[in-house]
Amino acid sequence: MRPKSEILEIMRIFQKENPNPQCELHFHNPYTLLVAVMLSAQSTDKGVNKATEKLFDIADTPQKMLALGEEKLKNYIKTIGLFNNKAKNIILMSRQLLENYGGEVPSDRDILTTLAGVGRKTANVVMNVWYKEPTLAVDTHVMRIAHRLDFSHGKTPLEIENDLMKVLPTEMVINTNHWLVLFGRYICKAQKPLCRQCPIKSYCRSKDKITD
């Protein structure tokens, strides 16, 4: 794992390049954000946004989602991977919100993770994006980039999250997921990294790094 000082230097470059990064999922309120993040597992944000464009016009609250029902929900999200299981969890989660939380999305990560289909990563995204809490969601992009840049040797998302939380100041944590996801999605791509466009190429030690 590289020194804390270098990690902070790299993160400051990301900060300078993109001082106000945004989540690329489309949502209207905390409930639709929660649904969108649940749908995004093993799927692209672009694919989720395409499916939810029409879905959220008619089902943007737990009440409306339950009224739509599981089978009709599947028709809206059938282009998304694992849509059967996701539809089941979204309906169960919506019922839990209505029965236990008055239809509101809790602003507590521990409570969020008790909802059907909601793991720590999803809860961290909701806490970060909607409630502006300094949480750090570790998805496949973040895990890959953290390993590639030698930010962490953690083998699980939680280990990587803990490693980063130890070295990053709170004001950076709030944007770290966005910075690493966007970097992994558009610059440091898994199949063909765009090294010539990379703002941190001088820090990269990867064997497949393209040098001019």
Image: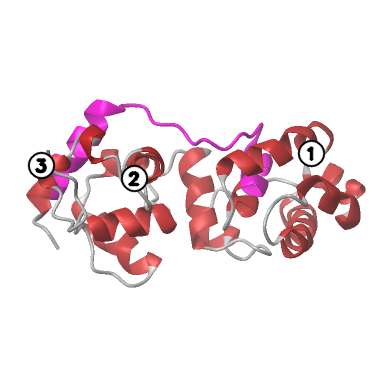
Give me the residue at 73% from left, 33% from top: 53
Q: What is the CA distance from the residue labelled 3 to the residue labelled 1?
A: 44 Å
Q: Position of residue 58 (x, y in %)?
A: 84, 35
Residue 184 sits inside the magenta stretch:
no
In magenta segment, residue 14: yes
Three-letter code, disc 2: Leu
Q: Earlier in the sequence, mark 3 or mark 1?
A: 1
- Report the side of 111 relative to 167 (left or right): right
**CB-based contact (under 8 Å), mark 3 and mark 1:** no
Residue 56's place in the image compared with 126, above or below, is above
Quadrant of the frame with the N terminus: bottom left
Classify residue 153 by image quadrant.
bottom left
Task: Determine which residue is flagged by label 3.
Answer: 202
Q: Which residues are magenta?
A: 7-36
Q: Which mark is first along the chain, 3 or 2?
A: 2
In what element is the residue under mark 1? helix
- How crowded is the residue under tag 3: few (<14 C-alpha within 10 Å), some, or many (20+)? few
